[in-house]
Amino acid sequence: MPSLLRKCDICRCWVDPERVAAVPKSKLCLTHAIKAEAYGGEYRLIWRQERTSKAGSLKLNYGSVIPKSVRNPSAVERVRLEYEESHF
Ligand SMILES: [Zn+2]
């Protein structure tokens, strides 16, 4: 079982374990995740055509368009700058 103890990337406070359980890949506490939303979100969803040409690929969604959520570093960075400006 993965640990539910995690510190926020921005403020280093403990992220609510319930939030970690709900959004396991998030590295932000709720406060900073909400702030990141204003810049497009900690994660954003991208859509791509699944590749079917690669050897050894799992052809589960053959030829379909699948969503993928990717980390949005610029949003996290802007929240970090905002946080630092207000604390130093
Ligand atoms: Zn935080």
Image (spheres, helix red, strand yellow):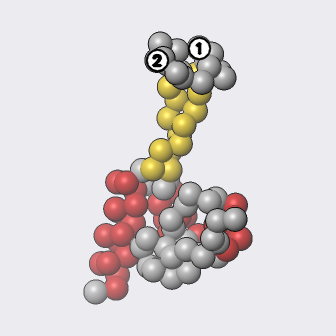
Q: Visible in this render: residue 12?
A: yes
Closer to us: 43 or 79: 43
Horizontal arrangement in the rendering, residue 84 relative to residue 22 (left or right): left
Q: Position of residue 71 (x, y in %)?
A: 45, 50
Q: Is residue 67 left or right of residue 80?
A: right
Element type at marker 2? loop
Q: Mark 1 sits on what residue?
A: 63
Q: Is residue 18 left or right of residue 35?
A: right
Measured from the top left, where is residue 68 in percent x and y?
54, 37
- Give the residue type that dot 2 points to: Lys
Image x and y of residue 87, in percent? 34, 85
Quadrant for the N terminus in the image: bottom right
Q: Residue at x 40, y 61 (%)?
A: 76
Depth check, front residue: 50 or 32: 50
Residue neighbourhood size for the residue with mark 2, other residues' Cα within 10 Å, grouped as few (<14), some (14–19), many (≥20)? few
Residue farthest toward the bottom in the current orientation of the protein = 88
- Are the residues flagged by discs 1 and 2 in contact, CB closer than 8 Å? no
Residue assigned mark 2: 54
Residue at 48 percent across and 17 percent down: it is 55
Mark 1 lies on a secondary structure that is loop
Figure check: 10 above or below 33:
below
